[in-house]
């Protein structure tokens, strides 16, 4: 007799996000980061124009934001989530699934319907 393989259900929570959802979230993150860059530029210009106290501290922070944020925004916009086999969490789940009992019964283990001929 041939044993059937254990049925392993596919959970919707295990499904990866669609390409469109990934692209939309990356675009939103990029726009948000570039908006922060623009805010750094505006705040830096206001601080220089107003000759604010501690200008020597605030101006380099604004310049650092204007330089690093675009670089990070491009890196994160081009980044995709890792493939399932490279994720650490999937390795732990895979070990737990291997240890779990099968979700379906073999043909011999299934309860048989008893049809009552007398009605």
Image: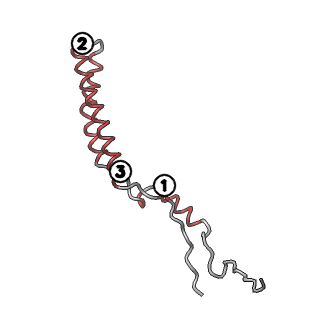
Question: To which residue does mark 3 refer?
Answer: 22
Q: Is residue 33 left or right of residue 102?
A: left
- Comes first in the chain, label 2 or label 1: 2
Which residue corresponds to the image point at 30% horizontal and 19% vertical from the top-left? 57
Indicate the position of residue 45 as horizontal and vertical percent values. 22, 20
Q: In the figure, residue 25 lies in which quadrant?
A: top left
What residue do we see at 54% from left, 62% from top?
A: 95
How crowded pointer 1 is (Cα within 10 Å; few <14, some 14-19, many 20+) is rated as: few
Going from the N terminus, do you reach mark 1 or mark 3 first?
Answer: 3
Name the quadrant of the N terminus: bottom right
Please indicate whether residue 90 sits to the left or right of residue 64 in the image: right
Residue that label 1 marks: 89
Residue 37 at x, y percent in the picture: 27, 31
Q: CA distance from mark 1 to mark 3?
A: 19 Å
Q: Which residue is mark 2?
A: 50
Q: Quadrant of the C terminus?
A: bottom right
Measured Cα–Cα span from mark 2 to mark 3: 42 Å
């Amino acid at each position: 007799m041939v044993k059937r393989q254990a049925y392993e259900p596919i959970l919707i929570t295990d499904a990866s996000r669609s390409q469109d959802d990934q692209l939309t979230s990356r675009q939103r993150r990029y726009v948000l980061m570039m908006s922060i860059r623009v805010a750094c530029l505006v705040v830096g210009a206001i601080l220089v124009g107003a000759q604010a106290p501690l200008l020597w501290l605030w101006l380099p922070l604004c310049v650092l934001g204007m330089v690093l944020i675009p670089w990070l925004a491009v890196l994160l916009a081009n980044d995709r989530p890792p493939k399932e086999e490279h994720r650490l969490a999937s390795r732990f789940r895979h070990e737990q699934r291997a240890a779990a009992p099968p979700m379906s019964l073999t043909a011999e283990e299934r309860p048989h319907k008893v049809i009552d001929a007398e009605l």
